[in-house]
Image (cartoon, rainbow, N blue to C red):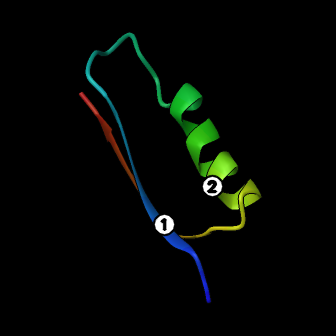
Amino acid sequence: MVKAARVYLRVSTEEQDLARQEAIVAGARAAGFYVAAVYREKA
């Protein structure tokens, strides 16, 4: 059985960046998930 994930990353201000949230993707992969898609949104 394949464990799949779709990850949605969002920050709400111009001063923030997505770098910290990118660890979520790495963590999902390290846990054995196939990351089917990553959606990124920056205000």
Q: Residue furthest top?
A: 15
State the residue position of label 1.
5
Count of labels shown? 2
Residue visible at 46% across and 23% down in the picture: 17
Q: Residues within 10 Å of mark 2 (few under 14, many from 20)?
A: some
Residue 5 in the figure: left or right of residue 1: left
Judge whether 9 appears above or below 4 on screen: above
Where, quadrant-wise, is the C terminus in this rendering?
A: top left
19 with respect to 38 (left or right): right
Q: Position of residue 11 (x, y in %)?
A: 33, 27
Asked whether the beta carbons under mark 1 and mark 2 sit within 8 Å of each other, the answer is yes
x, y (%) of residue 37? 45, 67
Q: Residue furthest bottom?
A: 1
| Residue 41 vertical position relative to residue 36 in the rendered view, above or below | above
Which quarter of the picture shows residue 12? top left
Q: Residue at x 41, y 16 (%)?
A: 16
Q: Amino acid at mark 2?
A: Ala
Res 37 seen here: no
In-front residue for pair 31/40: 31
Tell me: 12 left or right of 29: left
**Residue linked to disc 2:** 28
Q: Is residue 39 above or below residue 2?
A: above
